[in-house]
Image (cartoon, grey):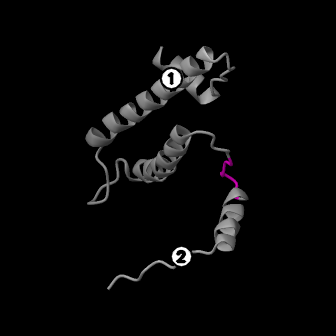
Amino acid sequence: MAEERKKLTREEVLEKKINLAQQRDSRVIQISSPGGNTITNILRQFDKAYSTFKVRLGEPGERGIPYEIGTPLMKEATEVILRFSKLTEEISETIRFKYYVPDEIKELVEIKS
């Protein structure tokens, strides 16, 4: 029988968050909207999945991902990122908020051009 996960106390959750925030590649953001909360939850899972995906891309064996499957997925992921940046830019313009396009997005646009 599967072991049930122990529910963490409020203090344990806070300690876990503090430890995570101290890690080198962590980002701490304040979420201000329900959509932002949903996107952050998706992003957390995407980041873990995409990281593993990239490691397994082109690897032989059962857990490996053939390039014929992986390349179109990588292309689609890039397109989604570019579309999300564009949507954020359009929303920002509508409310007269300055959107700073990340350098990585600028580089992707240059590569595609």
Ranked by sequence position, the earlier of labels 2 and 1 is 2
Q: Percent x, y for residue 100?
A: 67, 23
Reply above or below: 20 against 111: below
Element class at badge 2: loop
- Say what amino acid the circle numbered 2 marks: Lys
> Residue 108 appears at what percent x and percent y?
52, 24
Q: Residue drawn at (30%, 55%), measured in percent from left and top?
A: 60
Mark 2–mark 1 Cα distance, whole angstroms, equals 38 Å
Check disc 2 and report the residue beneath it.
Answer: 7
Relative vertical location of residue 110 with respect to residue 28 in this rendering, above or below: above
Q: Is residue 83 magenta?
A: no
The front one of 25 and 91 is 91
Residue situated in front as seen by the camera: 41 or 72:
41
What residue is drawn where x is 66% and y is 51%? 25
Front-most of residues 5 and 111: 5
Residue receiving disc 1: 87
Residue 79 is situated, as x and y percent measured from the top left of the image, at: 42, 27
Q: Single out the residue that lies furthest toward the bottom.
A: 1
Give the side of residue 73 with respect to residue 78, left or right: left
- Check disc 1 and give the amino acid type: Leu
Q: Residue at x 62, y 75 (%)?
A: 9
Which residues are drawn in magenta? 23-28
Based on the displayed image, in which of its 4 quarters is residue 105 positioned? top right
| Of the pair 34 and 46, the residue shown nearer to us | 34
Few, some or many residues within 10 Å of mark 1 (<14, 14–19, 20+)? few
Looking at the image, residue 6 sits to the left or right of residue 71; the answer is right
